Amino acid sequence: MKKVFVLAGSDTSGGAGIQADLKTYQETGVYGMTALTTIVAQNPEKGWAHDVYPIDVDTVQAQIRTILDGVGVDIMKTGMLPTTEIIELAAETIDKYNLPAVVDPVLACKGQDEPLYPENAKALRELLVPKALITTPNLFEAGQLAEMDNITTIEEMKEASSRIHELGAKNVIVKGGHEVEGDQAVDVFYDGEVYILLENEIIDTKYTHGAGCTFASAITSALVKGQSPMKSVEFAKNFITNAIQGSWRLNQYVGPVNQYENR
Ligand code: ADP
């Protein structure tokens, strides 16, 4: 059994974060272990506002020890990292254990376009993204990492992916999703040599909670099973398209993607 170490946040509503990651690993036949970096609770009295409760760095470190000294893994995947200290710890962990890493550079909860902590973009750019085997920014995160405003076209996605590659990430996939020009959900993959466009019809739904986490985890599963980065993003694109097709309404605010739709 291939084993994955996930360093990410908990989504109390169950759709994103480590909950999405573990469901994706279950559906793809790999074993996930999680070190929680933060707990995100949603406030039903305040229109589902996201309240973020970071975990202190010693507690994160204790979880990392359990997983990496107590068991050992084949690959690491990062999600929401709430403080620069935890971003630093993630980068040190990659080096210390010599792990291939999928870095999902989460900067905001879905539906919120302000970074949780502005200083985190700089720390991700300087400390963590350079160590990524692959990084998976959405348009907002790509803009922050590449220091570009308002990416809306495929040409700008290519420019962003090459700037992020220059930071040191070996492979980059910029997720356009439903926000990019045209009527396709387009992602741009760049490995330093060629740009590949991954396209699917945009699925007409507002229920895409957990799409980014699921996508990055599906890439992780394919990589750890020996696929190339390019084949892994193709696998993940297909996996997330099915999961969005099966998404559903959880309450008046949110609807999660459904990994089970890949069975
Ligand atoms: P994030 O959750 O990080 O914002 P996205 O939702 O932008 O991530 O992207 C995750 C994956 O889902 C990407 O491959 C993207 O193209 C795809 N995707 C997002 N929304 C849709 C949609 N409405 N229809 C089809 N694919 C989508």
Image (spheres, rainbow, N blue to C red):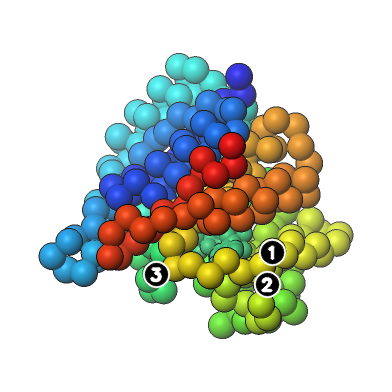
Give x and y (percent) for residue 71: 49, 17
Indicate the position of residue 143 as horizontal and vertical percent values. 57, 74
Q: Quadrant of the C terminus?
A: top right
Give the quadrant of the N terminus: top right
Amino acid found under the numbered disc labelled 1: Asn
Q: Is residue 190 left or right of residue 41?
A: right
Q: Residues within 10 Å of mark 3 (few under 14, many from 20)?
A: few
- At horizontal 79% and vertical 56% (from top left) the residue drawn is 191
> Disc 3 vs disc 2: Cβ atoms closer than 8 Å?
no
| Residue on which the image places disc 1 | 200
Residue that badge 3 annotates? 111
Question: Disc 3 or disc 2, which is closer to the eye?
Answer: 2
Real-space CA distance between mark 3 and mark 1, rounded to the nearest whole angstrom: 22 Å
Cα separation between marks 3 and 2: 20 Å
In the image, the residue with mark 1 has its CB under 8 Å from the nearest atom of ligand 1: yes
Label 2–label 1 contact, CB within 8 A:
yes
Q: Is residue 55 at all visible to an observer of this figure? A: yes
Q: What amino acid type is highlighted by mark number 3?
A: Gly
Badge 1 crowding class, 10 Å Cα cut-off, few under 14, some 14 to 19, many 20 or more, is some
Cα separation between marks 2 and 1:
6 Å
Mark 3 C-beta to ligand 1 under 8 Å: no
Please tell me whether residue 58 is drawn above or below residue 103 in the rendered image: above
Tell me the SS state at disc 2: strand
Which residue matches tag 2? Answer: 184
Q: Secondary structure at mark 1?
A: strand
Foreground of the two, 123 or 49:
49
